[in-house]
Amino acid sequence: MQESAAHAATAHAGDNYLTHDRGLLSWLFTLDHKRIGVMYLVAIMSSFVLGGVFALLIRIELLTPVKAFLSEDRYNEMFTVHGAVMIFLFIIPSIPAALGNFVLPLMLGAKDVAFPRLNLASFYLWVGGALFFLLALFLGGLDTGWTFYTPYSTTTSATVVAATMGAFILGFSSIFTGLNFVVTINTMRPPGMTWFKMPLFLWALYATAIIQILATPVLGITVLLLTAEKVLGIGIFDPVLGGDPVLFQHFFWFYSHPAVYIMILPAMGIMSELVSVFSRKHIFGYRFIAYSSVAIALLGFLVWGHHMFVSGQSQLASVIFSALTFSVSIPSGIKVFNWLATMYKGAISLDTPMCYALSFLALFGIGGLTGLFLGTLVTDVHLHDTYFVVAHFHYVMMGGTLIAFLGGLHYWWPKMFGRMYNEKWGRIGCAAIFVGFNLTFFPQFLLGVLGMPRRSARYRPEFESLHQLSTVGALLLGVGLLIAGVVLIHAAFRGKRAASNPWGGATLEWRCSSPPPPHNFDAPPMVGDPYDYDGLVYSPEHSGYLERQPDSKPETAPDYDSPTTSV
């Protein structure tokens, strides 16, 4: 059995989705979900680099309380574009569109998604939306903040219409991707893969897709109304014409708070995979984690008002939204405790993906706990619109979504490109990111408590030391991300050949070669428990895990560059 698996992997080594047809047009017009996922990955990471450069420029400007090189107007444009690029072009599509597109059919043992042409159309809609954002950047800038709040967005001379049209187009891309995933999971599960034999990453993608389908149209309608107000001067949000500017906030956050879970739910799905595989234990509380994904998706629609405690809404509404905010933290807490229980007494291997998983637990834990202060009425009034909100947001979105994305990227990189990266430098990059991130954003909690307003290019001298600490952390964070990027890119071209199953995962994507053949599987793989590792044994000969023969015994887990640390 082991030999046949090894021969299958070798047979596909020269016939995989990367080498099957090398022409540029074959990539641009491909219907292969794997190639579309890789194209999403390249485009999304390019957006991340752009947004990251803006972030570093912002932090350098804030190194001193006086002007360094950005005027107040240019600073407003800088943080607006940083926020819009990171939210709409990176965080929202990063895991579902890039990793999800690549992994979902493989996890199902399928040849592709249900609607391959719609999948390709979704990618080009994303590209079109991104071009509109770049158009807004180069046609005069955008200074409204990424939320486009009225009445300023309807009166400013900035290129609001181009940016909102970009968001509108990106919304269609998100809806089509979500629709494709729902149909694929509903109709293309192989025989034997019931709902409760699906990998938890698929549960997370399914819950995310529900939010994408139901919530994103609200954003589309909102930006269309904003564009109509801007271009035609009708009174939807203008109080002079009988409109209500706060109505825009209700519309926007009715989408954008569920959108927070579009960003974080797939990250939680990745965590369930990493924690189980690198602890060599069956996931604890499978059904609770699965149901909690659906619960988060549903409860996320009910808490948008906690962004508006100081907007003038009724006290009763504020109390209700505050209570609902606390309730939505329960399913997130269930996941965290189940991950910790999975690791308890597990044979934890501190490979790079697991290092990112542990970083996620620490950073997302801080982000979640500080969210309780913002969900409490008496403290939110003081902390609203301060750097405390900036720090909380980044601990959840960047400390959660980005860190999990990097963990998933390192986990599936051998499967995507058939190459192993340098474990030593992978862990160094993770450590630099973790230290740099905390050094960047933890001081901002203190700045917020002291009353430092966000979105301000100038500040009082007593805040200077904390801002300088934050800027030093941002530079270290940038170095860590650069190391991670170099490690992965080097591996894609020069890394050691990866086995079909280098980590010992039990989900179906590890049953095909690395990288996968054009149609994923020669024969439908056998469906089993996605978290049962008893049937796998490490083979030093093949540098990976193979199905255990009846008389075989487990051997020491592998390492590629330096000894794997176990606890």
Image: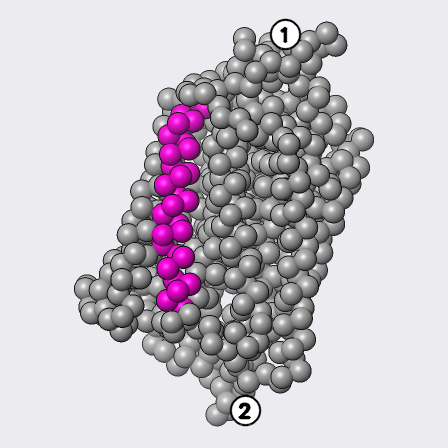
Q: Is residue 453 above or below residue 530?
A: below
Please give the residue where the numbered disc 2 appears in the rendered image. Answer: 242
Please give the residue where the numbered disc 1 appears in the rendered image. Answer: 3
The boundaries of the magenta stretch are: 419-448
* Percent x, y of residue 228: 50, 77
* Percent x, y of residue 307: 54, 72
On the image, which quarter does residue 221 sit in?
Answer: bottom right
Residue 427 is inside the magenta segment: yes
Residue at image position (62%, 36%) is 343
Q: Disc 2 residue type?
A: Gly
Q: Is residue 225 above or below residue 407?
A: below
Residue 86 is inside the magenta segment: no
* Percent x, y of residue 284: 71, 39
Residue at image position (80%, 31%) is 191
Task: Give the overall secondary structure of the magenta segment.
Answer: helix
Task: Give yes or no for contact between labels 1 and 2 (Cβ–Cβ under 8 Å).
Answer: no
Q: How many marks?
A: 2
Between 360 and 115, which is closer to the camera in this rendering? Answer: 360
Mark number displayed over residue 37: none
The local secondary structure at tag 2 comes to loop
Between 338 and 530, which is closer to the camera in this rendering? Answer: 338
On the image, which quarter does residue 214 sit in?
Answer: bottom right
Q: Is residue 475 left or right of residue 263?
A: left
Between 163 and 276, which is closer to the camera in this rendering? Answer: 276
Quadrant location, the N terminus: top right
Between 73 and 230, which is closer to the camera in this rendering? Answer: 73
Q: Is residue 317 left or right of residue 235?
A: right
Quadrant location, the C terminus: top right
